[in-house]
Image (cartoon, coloured by chain):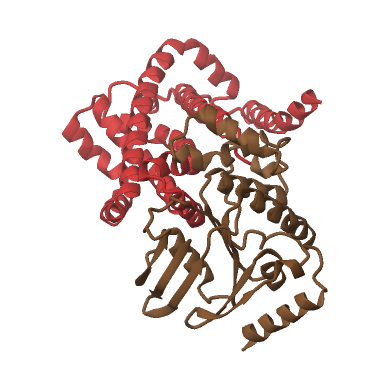
Chain colours: A brown, B red
Amino acid sequence: MIEIKNINFNFINQKILSDINLTVSSGEFISIIGPSGCGKSTLLNIISGITKPKTGEITVEGKKIAVGDKISYMQQKDLLLPWRNVRENAGIGLEIKGLPHTIIQKKISHLAKDFGLEKFLNYMPHELSGGLRQRVAFLRAVLIDNPIMLLDEPLGSLDAITKSSLHEWLMDVFRKFSKTIILVTHDIEEAILLANRVIVMSTNPGRILKEYIVDRNLVDNKDVTSNYFIKLKKEIIKDLIL
Amino acid sequence: MKKNIIIKNYLPPTASVFFVLILWQFSVIIFNVESWFLPSPSNILIELINSYEILLENSLVTLSEITIGLIISILISIMISGMIFWFKSFEKTIYPLLITSQIIPVFTLAPILIVWFGTGLFSKIIIIVLFTFFPLVINLVTAIKNVDMDMIRMFNSLGCTKFQMFRKLYIPAILPNFLSGCKVACVISVIGAVIGEWIGSSNGLGWVMKISGPQFQTARVFASIVCLSFIALVLFFTVVMLEKKLLRRYPN
């Protein structure tokens, strides 16, 4: 369980985040949605530990944690190192953790198939499509084997078709690895399609406006036209416009 | 196919060089230019063959000065950029000194350096270092500053140490800029060496040019220039080869 308590964050005297309180249970998939500049990415930076908040604290299972411990963070850009091939890029997190080369290779080979990357392990990043590059970034994050994953618009730079195929795949992969996931997105449909809870944030300063529980029994990964889906979408849009 | 690419890549530059040489050769013959004024390419070639001993001996002197100067320059630039990576405030401390070192024309410092350090190898090395470390440092510092902030954030989120960040992100990220700086340094190191030798020396190609000019041994001056250009080219292409090897996995 992640507890985000009373987080406030200022940047050059401007209040970016105000009194953020959020609890995420183990295995939950939550989406955070909000207008540009509402501090969504800053919140993820704070949860990951790479940015220090002005006040407040983050605990995992009741304890404060070190950066890189228990939490993997995936940003919008795939951030693949251009001088490393897919295999070496995927293994970078484990390398930093000091795991032996043979074990890293074993883990990569073991997971590559689930990520549809088994044929591409020796490719360089510039030889891959955007969707494949993003899969490598997912693999890198999953390999670290932290129970919590922060995803900052991971599909934001992809085209609609690639995005929709990745949605389905993402759900399968994360269910399989039973991770706790916090996804930040601009895309309302994506927020509803993937999560079991949608957190709506407002801007100036960024704070939690509302949260919606998504009934997963009523949401089909491919169908964005069901009554339930449209009703939920309309409500979120209303919140965002206000 | 490969043969075609070689022809396509190397034929135009080779042809243009030959064209200029032939034009030069015929102009000297047609206009009856005296060889002490402007020797023809064939005269220079003959001079290269006849004086190969003196040219080779002095080329080796210049080459050794350049090699030592470049190695010191590279080490200094790596040290400075390493300090800038580890201690952010070091950049503010060192930058005014770096800029000042370039505002003062090194040419004007050369006579003072000869007075202080004599006409031997040491003064030449200092002049070459002063000439070459600036492009190296500037390229490295720029590359350090240009490392993608998101990449740094990603490495931080993985919980890496500063040393791991330096080894796994910074070194590979700045390598292309470092090698570009080396290419520039290789070419200008030759200028530094010649200036040092010209102002105070008893050997080296700069010295050969200095004593040959007043004796109207113009062909020998040109032959020395050919040797200097050859040294610069060899150094430059050594870095190009190194670049091909080290950057083979980088895009473009």
As displayed, is residue B230 above or below residue A228? above
* A223 and B205: which is toward the camera: A223
What is the quadrant of residue B66 in the picture? top left
As displayed, is residue B231 above or below residue A122? above
* B91 and B34: which is toward the camera: B91
> What residue appears at the point 27 percent right and 25 percent down from the top-left corner?
B121
Residue reaching furthest to the left? B116
Residue reaching furthest to the bottom? A242
> What residue appears at the point 47 percent right and 62 percent down from the top-left corner?
A2
> What residue appears at the point 35 percent right and 48 percent down from the top-left corner?
B85
Q: Seen in the image, is A52 located left or right of residue A112?
A: left
Look at the image and tell me whether residue B252 can be seen: no
> What residue appears at the point 62 percent right and 70 percent down from the top-left corner?
A197
As displayed, is residue B72 above or below residue A10? above
* A38 and B60: which is toward the camera: A38
At which x and y percent is residue A212? Answer: 62, 76
